Amino acid sequence: MPAPTPAPTQPSGPSPPALRLLFLLALAAGCFHGLGAAPLFDLDEGAFAEATREMLERGDLVSPYLLGEPRFDKPAFVHWLQAASVSLFGWSEWALRLPSALCAALWILLATAALARVWGERPALLAGAAMAASLEIPVLAKAATADALLNLWLAAACLALWLHLREGRRLWLLAAYAAAGLGFLAKGPVAVAVPAALAALHLLMRGEPGRLLRLAAEPWGWALFLGIALPWYLLQYRAQGWAFVEGFFLHHNVGRFGGTLEGHGGPLWYYLPVVLAGVLPYTAVLLAGVPRLRGLWREPERRYMLLWFLLVLALFSLSGTKLPHYVVYGYTGLFALLGLALAEGPLPRPLWLFLPPLLWFLLLLALPALLEAWAARLDDPLARTQLAEAGDPFGPWWTPALAGAAALMVAWMLLPERRPWPGRASRLLTAGLATTLSVSGLLLPAVGQVRQAPVQALGLLARERPEPVVMWGVNLPSFAVYAQRLTPRRLPRPGELVFTRADRLEALPGRWRVLHRRGGLVLALALP
C-alpha cells in the first residue's frame, strides 16, 4: 500500500539574510525614493514650506507665519527641521521633504526594534518591511508636513508604554513622557491623547486602575514632558497672546474634532475604505485576520496593538474633520499584527492574496483612459484646463512598468509554492515594493505634473520680476515658495503682480495685463 502523500505546507518565508535585505530595500523605497520627483502639493505641503520660508526670512524661530499672517495650525517643530534641511542643502522639494523621510525611517526602525524585543526578529522585520512597502505610509513619509514627525513621537510614546507595561522598567515610562512632549511640540494634544487613552483602556481592561494612577503621577515624567513642550508654547503665547490659544487649541484642535474644517468631512465609515486601500498589498491578510480577532484580544500584548489601531479608528471616525492620513496614527499597531500574521500564517491562497495589488496596478494602467473620459465631465474649469494642457504626464514608463507589475502579480498567483520560487510572505513583500514604487515613481509625479507644475512654473517666473506680487482668488502657497517672495492674499494695487485663476480674471477690479498663462492659472500685472 503506497504511503499517503503529505499535505502541501506553506513555505516558511524568506531566510533571515533575505528578510533583512527585503527590510532595507523596503525602508529605502518607502521613505526616500522619489523625494524630489514631484513639485510641492497644495495646500498642505505648500503651506508648511512657505511658513518655513517666511520663518527664515523674518528671522523669527518662534511664530510661524503664512502669506504674511500668523499661522496657528501647528507648532514650530517641523519648521525648525525644514529650515535646517534647506539651510544645509538649499531650497528644493527633496530638502523640504527630507525631515519627513528621516522621521518615517526612524519611526519604522523604532517599531521594528520594539517588536523584535518582544516577539523576535522575524515578525518584527516582516512588520517593518510591510510598513515601508505599502501604499499609504510611504506617501506620508514623503510629504513636507508635520505628520511623519507626529507619527514618530506618537508611536515612540505608545511603544515605550507597551514595553514599560510588559517589563516594568521606569526608563520606558520616562521615554514615553519625553516622546509625548516631543509629539506635543510636533502637532499638539493628539500626541498625548492617543498614548494616554491607550494606556488607560489597556490597564482598565486588565483590572489595574491603581497602576494607571501611578503611570499618570510620575513626577520626573511630567518634568520631562513640560521641559520639552512648554517653552515654545510660553514663547508663542507671549508673542501672539490669546489669539494663539484661540487659533491653535480652540479652532484647530477642539474645532477640528467637533466640527468640519475646510470641508474635510465624511460619514462614520469613512476610514474603512481608506484602511483597505492604505494597507495595500496586505488587504487580503487584513481581511483574513478579522475572524481571529477574538484570539488576538485574549493575549494582552497583541490586544494592546489591536486596541491602538481600533482606538485611533474610532476616535477619528467620530471626529467632525476627516482626512485620510489621520488613521495612520494607528497603523503601527495594525502593521505589528500584520507582521505576526505574515510570520505565523496561514496566509490566504495566492489567488486572493495578490488580487488586491493586481487590481491596483490594473486601475493605474487604466488611469490615462479614465482621465480622458472624465475630463469632459469636469465642472471645474481649472481642473479641466490643467488636464487639457498637461500633455502626457504619465511618461514612457507608465504602461510597461505597470503592465510588468500586474504580470508579476499574476505570476505570484500561479507559480508553484516550492523552491526555487519564493513563498507567500516573500512574494507579498515584493508586491509591497512594487506598490510603493508605483506611487512614488509614477503616480505622484504624474499628479504633480497636472496640478502643481503650472503653479511651480508661474512661481519661478515671478521670482525673476522686480514688482511686488500678491495672490487673489486662489490659495496655493507653493507659488510663494517657488517665487521666494512674500505673497499676501489680497487685491493687487497698480504696479503689482497678481497670481490668480484665468477664469476669475474678469472679476478682478481695475485694469491688468496677462504676462504668463499656465494650466488655467495666470500671472498678470495690475495697471494704473
Image: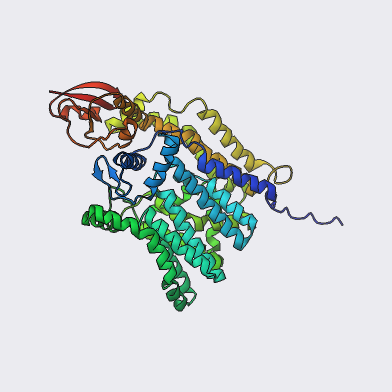
Residue 403 image point, x, y percent: 55, 32
Is 348 displayed left or right of 7 in the figure? left
Q: Residue at x 33, y 40 (%)?
A: 56
Query: Which residue is nearer to you in this view: 305 or 32?
Result: 32
* Residue 303 seen: no
Residue 55 image point, x, y percent: 32, 42
Quadrant of the snapshot with the N terminus: bottom right
Q: Is residue 175 above or below residue 40?
A: below
Q: Is residue 204 above or below residue 346?
A: below
Q: How is the image coloured?
A: rainbow
Quadrant of the snapshot with the C terminus: top left
Q: Is residue 408 above or below residue 317?
A: above
Q: Residue at x 44, y 30 (%)?
A: 368
Is 407 displayed left or right of 383 in the figure? right
Q: Quadrant of residue 446?
A: top left
Is 515 displayed left or right of 223 in the figure? left
Number of disc labels: 0
Q: Residue at x 53, y 51 (%)?
A: 108
Residue 315 image point, x, y percent: 38, 60
Looking at the image, which residue sits at the far front?
59
* Residue 470 seen: yes
Q: Is residue 20 above or below residue 225?
A: above
Looking at the image, which residue sits at the far right?
1
Q: Quadrant of residue 198?
A: bottom left
Is 183 displayed left or right of 385 in the figure? right
Residue 53 image point, x, y percent: 33, 39
